C-alpha cells in the first residue's frame, strides 16, 4: 500500500502587504512586481506570531482533516529555514503544543524544497510500517530574514504555513513516485549571511526553469505515466514565469496549474502545501486526479512527487 496525504491544513497571517505598500518604501513599482513575478500581495506575521505559532495552526487543521488524534502521530517533521530559534526545534515545540505524546520530532532544512523533502521522508516511515501517521509541516517567517531595504528580495517573500498528515491510502492511490536532488555548488546564489537572505535572482531563475521542468517530467515517467496522464501541477510558487515554464514542459493548459503566488508571494517551504490546501478547497484537485508537485530552492535543492489523489 502506498503512503498518501490524508489530511491538509494551512495558515496565512491576516496582515496583508501589497505591492502598493512596497512602492512607498522601495524604488519599485506594482507594475514591475506583477509582470516580473506575478505577485500582488503577501502576508506578514507580526511580532506576536513566530514560526511555531503558524505551524501549530496549520497542523491542527491537517490533523482534524485526517480524522486522527495527535497521540496517533509517530513522527513530526517540520521543514523550515526560519525556526523560532536553532533549538529546541519547531517540531519539538509543536509536539508539545499538539499533545502528540507518542511522536518523535525533527526539523529539516531544505529551503523551498523542504516540504518535498519532508513528505518523501514521511513516506518511507509509513510504507515501511514504522509509523501509521507522520505530520509534515512547511512553515516560514521569511519576513524576519528579509532586508526590507533590498528591492531585489523584499518584494518576493511572504510568511505562512502548510501541513499534511501522511498515512496509508487505498490501493492505487497515494504517492506513485518521487525525486529528490541537490547541487551544493549553487549554494552561493541564494543564502543567508548574517541576518539577511541574499540572492542572485538571475542564476536561481535559470536553475529553477531547467530543474522544475525536468523533475516534473522525471516523476511522471517514474510513475509509469506520460504527460497526458497528468491532471494538475502544483509548482513551488516562486515566480509566475518559472511556474509557467514547468507547466509548458508538462503541456498542461493554464487552468491545470496551481497559482496562489499573487496572494501569498513566495512562502518557501510553505508554498506547495498552501497551494494544495486552496486547490482542494476550490475543487481544483479531486479524487483520482494525477497531480505533480515540484519544488526547488536554496542549496540548491529540489524535489518532486507524483500522486494519485485520494485516501
Ligand atoms: O524560492 C526560490 C527563491 N528565489 C527565486 O525563485 C527567485 C528566482 N528569480 C527571480 O524570480 C527573478 O530573477 C527576479 C524576479 C528576482 C528578477 O527577474 P529577472 O528577470 O531575473 O530580472 P533581473 O534581476 O535581471 O533585473 C531586471 C532589472 C534590473 O535593472 P537593470 O539592471 O536592467 O537596470 C534590476 O535592477 O530590474 C531591476 N529590479 C527591479 N526593479 C524594480 C530588480 N528588482 C526590482 C524591483 N523593482 N523590485
Image (cartoon, helix red, strand yellow):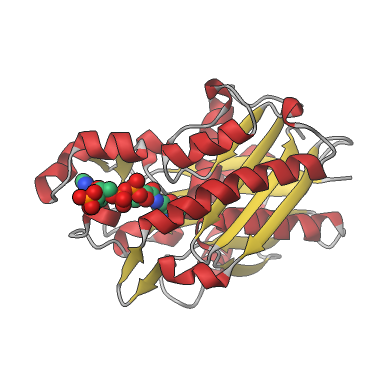
Q: Residue furthest left?
A: 24
Residue at (62% x, 65% y) in the render = 182
Residue 254 relative to residue 22: left or right: right
| In the depicted structure, whether residue 177 falls above or below residue 291 | below
- Quarter holding the C terminus is top right
Residue 137 relative to residue 180: left or right: left
Residue at (72% x, 31% y) in the render = 227
Nearer to me, 105 or 159: 159
| In the depicted structure, whether residue 25 falls above or below residue 253 | below
Q: Position of residue 184 (x, y in %)?
A: 56, 72
Q: Position of residue 137 (x, y in %)?
A: 56, 54
**Tally of numbered discs:** 0
Residue at (61% x, 46% y) in the render = 294
Residue 96 relative to residue 155: left or right: right
Nearer to me, 118 or 237: 237
Residue at (41% x, 74% y) in the render = 85
| In the depicted structure, whether residue 230 falls above or below residue 160 | above
Q: Is residue 49 visible?
A: no
Q: Position of residue 164 (x, y in %)?
A: 62, 47
Nearer to me, 275 or 295: 295
The quarter of the displayed image where residue 77 is located: bottom right
Q: Position of residue 1 (x, y in %)?
A: 89, 45
Q: Is residue 112 visible?
A: yes
Amino acid at each position: 500500500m502506498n503512503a498518501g496525504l490524508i489530511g491538509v491544513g494551512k495558515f496565512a497571517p491576516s496582515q496583508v502587504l501589497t505591492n502598493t505598500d512596497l512602492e512607498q518604501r522601495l524604488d519599485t513599482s506594482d507594475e514591475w512586481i506583477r509582470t516580473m513575478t506575478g505577485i500582488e500581495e503577501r502576508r506578514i506575521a507580526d511580532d506576536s506570531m513566530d514560526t511555531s505559532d503558524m505551524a501549530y495552526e496549520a497542523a491542527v487543521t491537517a490533523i482534524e482533516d485526517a480524522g486522527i488524534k495527535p497521540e496517533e502521530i509517530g513522527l513530526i517533521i517540520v521543514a523550515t529555514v526560519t525556526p523560532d530559534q536553532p533549538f529546541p526545534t519547531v517540531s519539538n515545540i509543536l509536539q508539545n503544543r499538539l499533545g502528540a505524546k507518542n511522536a518523535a520530532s525533527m526539523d529539516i532544512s531544505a529551503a523551498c524544497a523542504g516540504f518535498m523533502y519532508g513528505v518523501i521522508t514521511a513516506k518511507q516511515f509509513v510504507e515501511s510500517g514504522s509509523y501509521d501517521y507522520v505530520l509534515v509541516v512547511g512553515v516560514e517567517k521569511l519576513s524576519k530574514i528579509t532586508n526590507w531595504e533590498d528591492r531585489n528580495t523584499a518584494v518576493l517573500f511572504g510568511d505562512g504555513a502548510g501541513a499534511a498528515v501522511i498515512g496509508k491510502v487505498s490501493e492505487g492511490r497515494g504517492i506513485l513516485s518521487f525525486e529528490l536532488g541537490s547541487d551544493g555548488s549553487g549554494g552561493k546564489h541564494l543564502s543567508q549571511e548574517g541576518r539577511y537572505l541574499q540572492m542572485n535572482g538571475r542564476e536561481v531563475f535559470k536553475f529553477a526553469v531547467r530543474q522544475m521542468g525536468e523533475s516534473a517530467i522525471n516523476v511522471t515517467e517514474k510513475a509509469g505515466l506520460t504527460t497526458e496522464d497528468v491532471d494538475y501541477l502544483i509548482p513551488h510558487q516562486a515566480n509566475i514565469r518559472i511556474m509557467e515554464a514547468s507547466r509548458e514542459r508538462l503541456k498542461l493548459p493554464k487552468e491545470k496549474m496551481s497559482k496562489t503566488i499573487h496572494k501569498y508571494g513566495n512562502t518557501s517551504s510553505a508554498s506547495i502545501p498552501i497551494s494544495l490546501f486552496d486547490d482542494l478547497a476550490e475543487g481544483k484537485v479531486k479524487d483520482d486526479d494525477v497531480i505533480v508537485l515540484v519544488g526547488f530552492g536554496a542549496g540548491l535543492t529540489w524535489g518532486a512527487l507524483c500522486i494519485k489523489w485520494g485516501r
